[in-house]
Amino acid sequence: MSTATLDLHRSTVTAGRVLAQLRGDHRTVALMLVVPCVLNGLVAWIYDGTPVFDRIGSSLVGVFPMVVMFIVTSIATLRERQSGTLERLLTTPLGKGDLILGYALAFGGVVVVQSLLVSGLSVGLFGLDVAGPLWLLLVVALLAGLLGTSLGLLASGFARTEFQAVQFMPAFVLPQFLLCGLLTPREDMPGPLAVLSDVLPLSYIVDATKEVGTSASPDVAVPLLVIAGFVVAALALGSATLRRRTA
């Protein structure tokens, strides 16, 4: 995504159009805002009375939003292409970079609300014990949602149908879920899996949320910078691989 071709006004207009569409799509909005909260609440309920939720709950504050935003953005972008909207937009002065940035801004606005809800409810209602500052957990949750958005935009460029977009979830998300350190500490994994874990973005989300959850003075600068780098790289690749048509 070349910054030289970006036009912020065109991107904000695109973001406004996407947000206007979302206002009329209540089910998609509920999927983005409600589902991560419900899933975290369900985990808290399952492990009620045990220390398990305090151990993994902060990581799930990042994991669930990332997965949900990946699914929603990959399908939403593909719908634009299938309906011909993308084709029409790209006959205007709107560039691919402007379009991708517009989508990122629109869904980023939703992610802000999502991160406030999932973090606030996890700590305030579900009883998640966080040793570090709550605002830092909010930042990690926000970056996790943005990461899911950017990966979803990237994946949409390789799908021809909504079914194919959903099929990308096992390829993009499940390996990261298995290797991110949520199920087994990354340092305890066999060498090749630990190396693979080091190059997957969800690993750094879990690293950051674990640090915030367990340390009163968390040091998360490195994982946050790595996550931000993945977001920028995914948006750039999404812009470069964006196609007008599904076939």
Image (cartoon, rainbow, N blue to C red):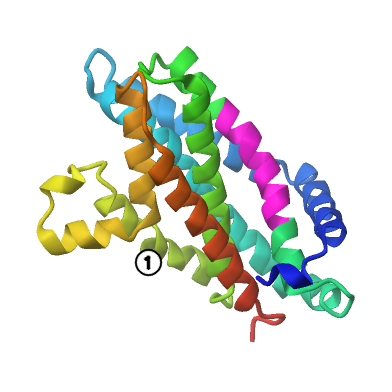
61 vs 8, nearest the viewer: 8
Up-down relation of residue 127 to residue 244 (above or below):
above
| Residue at 39% across, 36% down | 220
Query: Quarter-wise, where is residue 195 in the image?
Result: bottom left
- Identify the residue position indicated by label 1 in the image: 171
Q: Position of residue 102 (x, y in %)?
A: 75, 57
Is residue 203 shown left or right of residue 148? left
Q: Quadrant of the C terminus?
A: bottom right
Q: Position of residue 61 (x, y in %)?
A: 44, 33
Is residue 100 in the magenta section? Answer: no
Q: Residue furthest bottom?
A: 247
Is residue 109 in the magenta section? Answer: yes
Q: Is residue 95 visible?
A: yes
Span highlighted in magenta in the image: 103-116
Q: Position of residue 216 (x, y in %)?
A: 35, 18
| Residue at 84% across, 50% down | 16
